[in-house]
Structure formats: structure tokens, C-alpha cells
Image (tube, helix red, strand yellow):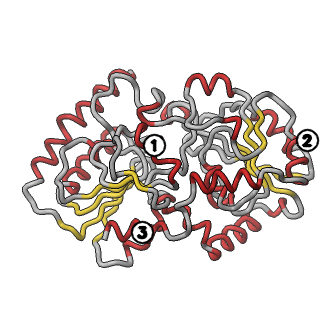
Amino acid sequence: MFRIRMMFKMLCQHIVFPFVYFFNRIRPVDKKLVILADSHHDGCPEQMTYIRKLLMESDCKVEEHFFDIYTIGKWEAFKKMVLFMARYAVAGTVVVCDYFLPVASCNKKKKTKVVQLWHGCGAFKKFGYNSKEDIPEGYVGNVHKNYSLVTVSGDGAIKPFETAMVLGVGNIIKPIGVSFTDRLFDEDYIGLCKDKFRFEYPDAVGKKVILWAPTFRGNAKKKKGENNMLPGEEYVNLLMEDDNYYVIKSTHPHLHQSGRMTTSELLCCVDLLITDYSSVFFEYLLLDKPIIFFAPDYDEYSANRGFYLDYKTLPGKVLTLDTDLKPHVKELLEQDEYSSQRTEFKELYMNACDGCATRRIANYIL
């Protein structure tokens, strides 16, 4: 079945989509037309909300192509991608924030810009062409083809992105900041998140709030809606039994249904983050709060996936064996000894995130 899906994808990428683009490319490029596209959400992804707002306030024409390929069915997804290709042929700019097959399926016009915002900061676990889990061996074509600009959060992310996207050394990957991090510099946004948190989680009042945000594992189609126990989750469950703490689980949206608040909203409201391999910790660095890296399956995950950095040197308490989390949480909340390490990581991987990234990206588009 997997082989059949791969063959269908390559048929679309190399024949159907290029034909639709070629058929429509006779029409001139409309420099004012900006297309926002994503195939993992049925509405505007969080990663695009700030740039969408700025573009809507400008004189450009914003067109949205959002759909969740895993919920609408293959035929509906195919039709939406075909429609995108027709509009792509005349667009001045296309903005994406994740893998989006159609954008790489043709030789685009030179006058058309493609901006990849990506959906994570820094460079943690291997992805793209550095990971067989992301792009299987034998896949023909480059899914990152046609990018004009890839925005990254800091200087330390440039080299990993170059190898992961097979873009080579050039001027495409730029550390001009990640748009969605601007909200962590927005006092109004943070205030609204805290108000929402008090409403949604009234039982958390008077307790230390802990967010458990593990990485996504495996194939999104296979995992969606399943309720599998994740590595280390039993110890998180034990932590939830302690009346001193209020623990919130925020698993990847492809694993479980979305909760009352998004992970990004919760970051503004919690006292401590626990994760294994999620790049969400890079965002959390901007808030300068303690982190526990809890990865009981570290040896296996490291051998299968790998990292761009030394896991043992991460800016927080690193736990790579099954262990009771309570004493580690108590110790870290009472005495945070990792502040200087967080500052070093932030200066390397998040130095371009200053609250003005969206404006810089918009200036490139406009």
C-alpha cells in the first residue's frame, strides 16, 4: 500500500501537476497575488497567522489554499492541489510552512517567489533528506525545490537546513527570524493566553504548571486518532498524581485531538517544560524558563533518527533513562542552574528572533 501511495505521489509530482502548471503559465505573473498554502490544516496554521495579518493589511491580494490532506480524502486533496497549481502559475509569491508537494513539482517562473517559513525553530532532530522517516529512499525529486527564501531562527540553524533540504550553500536560507515567535514578544498575546489559561484550567491556580510536549513520532496518517502510550508517559502520569503540580499533556496534533489550548499558547503560561526531542524548546528559550529533556528511548531514537547537536549538552536537565520525575522537577523549580546554558543556546539558535521577524519577511514579499 505504501508503494502504491508513493507511486501516485510521484505520478502527480512529475506528470499531472507540471502539466496543469504548464497549461496555465501562459498567463502573466500577478506580483500582487500572494498565496498562503498548507496541506496539514483546514485553516490558517499558527505559523502563518502573523504574516497573514500583515499581508492582509497591505495592498497585495491574499489567496488561501488550506486543507488537511488526512481528513478530506485523497480525491478532494487532489482537486485542491490541481487548483493550487493553476493559481501558482500566476502568483507573485507563495508562502508555505511545511512540506507541500505541489510547490516543488514544476519549474516555476523566475518572477514567482516561494517562501518557506517552516514550522519549527532551531535545528534539533534530523529531518528532510537527513531522515528516512521524513523522505523515504527512492523518492524521486526534491520536495524542497523552488524555494526563494527559507527563514530560520538563528545562525546555528543554517547548516542543518542546507543539508536537510539539499539546497546547498547559497543565499536562500536566511536567519531573519521565524514569524510565529513574534507573539512571544507581544505582551497583548501573552496576556490573552494567560487569561484563557485561567478560564480553561481553573484547577491549576496555586500550583506549579508543567507542560509535557513530546515530539511527533512516525507516520502522521498511521498515528492520527490513536491513543498509544508514548515513551516516558507513565512517569508523566505519576507526576500528575502530585497535588503540588498541574501537568498538561500537549502531544503532537497528528497523534491526538487538539486540546483546549495550543502548545504555543501554553508556553506562555507554564513554569516548566518537559520534552524529549521536540523543537518547541527553542521557542521556550525566549521565555527563559527551566526545561527537562526526558527521553527514556534516547539510545534507540538517536540510532534511528539522529540529531544535529549533542543531546547531552542541551540547556536543561537531561534524563535518558526511565526515572521518577518528581525529584528532578522539585529540584529544578527550586534551583534553576541552567540559565546561562539557555542564554548560550538562544544566542546561537534564536538570535534572529526579536519580535520583528514578520516585518522582515513581509518586506521581502512586498
The image quadrant of residue 8 is top left
Residue 137 drawn at (x, y percent): 38, 23
Whether pointer 2 and pointer 1 mark residues with C-beta atoms closer than 8 Å, the reply is no
Q: Which amino acid, by three-letter code, is at mark 2?
A: Pro
Mark 3 secondary-structure assignment: helix
Mark 1 secondary-structure assignment: helix
Q: Can you say whether 339 is above or below 76 in the image? A: below
Residue positioned most to the left: 26
Q: Nearer the viewer, residue 23 or 164?
A: 164
Left or right: 62 in relation to 317: left
Residue at the spot of label 2? 327
Residue at the spot of label 1? 159
Q: CA distance from mark 2 to mark 3?
A: 44 Å
Q: Can you say whether 82 is above or below 3 in the image? A: below
Q: Nearer the viewer, residue 296 or 150?
A: 150
Left or right: 254 in relation to 74: right
Q: In terms of sequence position, does the residue under pointer 1 or pointer 3 come before the other?
A: 1
Mark 1 or 3, which is nearer the eye?
1
Residue at the spot of label 3? 360
